Image: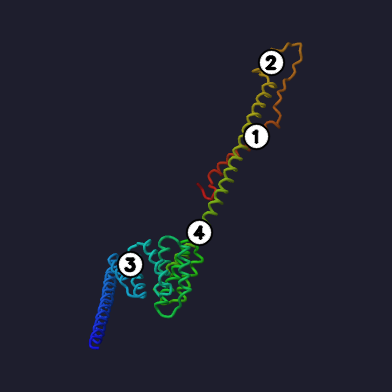
Amino acid sequence: MYMRQRGCVFWLVLLIIISGVFSYAQNSETDQYTRRYQNGIAFYQMSRWQEAAIEFRRAQEIAANINDWSQALYWVILSQMAYSDFGSALLDMAELERMAPSSAYTRDIVYHRARVYYIQGYFEEALHFFNRYNTSTSDVDRESSDRRAAAFFWMGECLYSMGQFDEAEKFYAWVIGRYPDSPKIEASAYRLDIIKQKKIENELLALLQWSHEETLRTSEEYQRTIRTYEHTLNLYQRRIAELSSAENEFLGNNTEPLPETVSQAAVAVPAAQTVVPVIIEEPPSTGNSLIDRAIQLESDLQGILRERTQISPWGGNR
């Protein structure tokens, strides 16, 4: 009987010791987790993000429950994003979503995943995750309202980066109208001004392009007119040359040299013969009239051509 009581006491003491050891070990791990986590926060606040990531990772490895594990991994991800290790951040995001799908940190990770995609230039994917974040949260407090306003702003940034300015403008206007106290108000207003300026620039560019095309058409018409005048002038010059040649030939065939005096003419003719007056016919008046008109037409054409060449296609003098 006595020996049995001693045996029970022994096992009871052993159980108490083991429980104490486990409790001490557990308390020691909890204290170690808390110390690692606090060290990570301190490094993060000092912008020593790689050291912060190391401390958070150690805290994750010794976490006693899923909540501590999720918390430590969440800050590992934030630290990785801070020093631009986006590949590792995306891997840890997937791990967090797999191991703790219902955690509050998992919901916030959707927002950060969208930010990573935006930074890497995957605007369609980023737009999807920002929208997914906004549909999974509500404006329950100031912090959530600011985060949702930021998500709407970044959705506008995705559309802006893709050149969809009209759609982006709606998101910026929504942030300004729905979240007047959001930190993204100034950035949204700035983007709206930029979009307005871009629209004006596009309108001016279209107007300049139209004006340039009209100028080219006017210039082409002007060049065609000049060529037409030059061609017409050349035709009239050739016609005048032909008429001048015909006149000279006509005069050469129908005129003879006259005697110097009438007495010389009388001597040259026998006395028995009757003196017949020599009548010199003048060239037909129609020929001279045509030549004069052609010369006058050439002069008029040259005057018009000089006047046209002194005027630019745009209505001003050169």
Judging depth in this view, the residue of 89 and 32 nearest the camera is 32
Check residue 292 in the rendering and tell me which mark sits there, or answer none: 1
* Up-down relation of residue 177 to residue 161 (above or below): below
Judging depth in this view, the residue of 81 and 199 nearest the camera is 81
User: Which quadrant: the N terminus?
Assistant: bottom left
Which is nearer the N-term, disc 3 or disc 1? 3
Q: Name the residue located 27 percent from the left edge and 69 percent from the top edge.
A: 43
* Up-down relation of residue 125 to residue 181 (above or below): above
Q: Which residue position is annotated with label 2?
A: 265
Mark 3 to mark 1 CA distance (whole Å): 99 Å
* Up-down relation of residue 247 to residue 190 (above or below): above
Q: Name the residue located 34 percent from the left edge and 70 percent from the top edge.
A: 75
Label 4 Cα crowd, 10 Å radius (few <14 / some 14-19 / many 20+): few
Label 3 Cα crowd, 10 Å radius (few <14 / some 14-19 / many 20+): many
Which is nearer the N-term, disc 2 or disc 4? 4
Comparing labels 2 and 1, the label whose residue is closer to the camera: 1
Is residue 187 visible in the rendered image? The answer is no
- What secondary structure is marked by label 1? helix
Do the numbered discs 3 and 4 sit on residues whose CB atoms are within 8 Å? no
Which is nearer the N-term, disc 2 or disc 1? 2
Check residue 204 in the rendering and tell me which mark sits there, or answer none: 4
Do the numbered discs 2 and 4 sit on residues whose CB atoms are within 8 Å? no
Q: Name the residue located 27 percent from the left edge and 66 percent from the top edge.
A: 51
Amino acid carrying label 3: it is Ser
Horizontal side of residue 268 vs 85, given as left or right: right
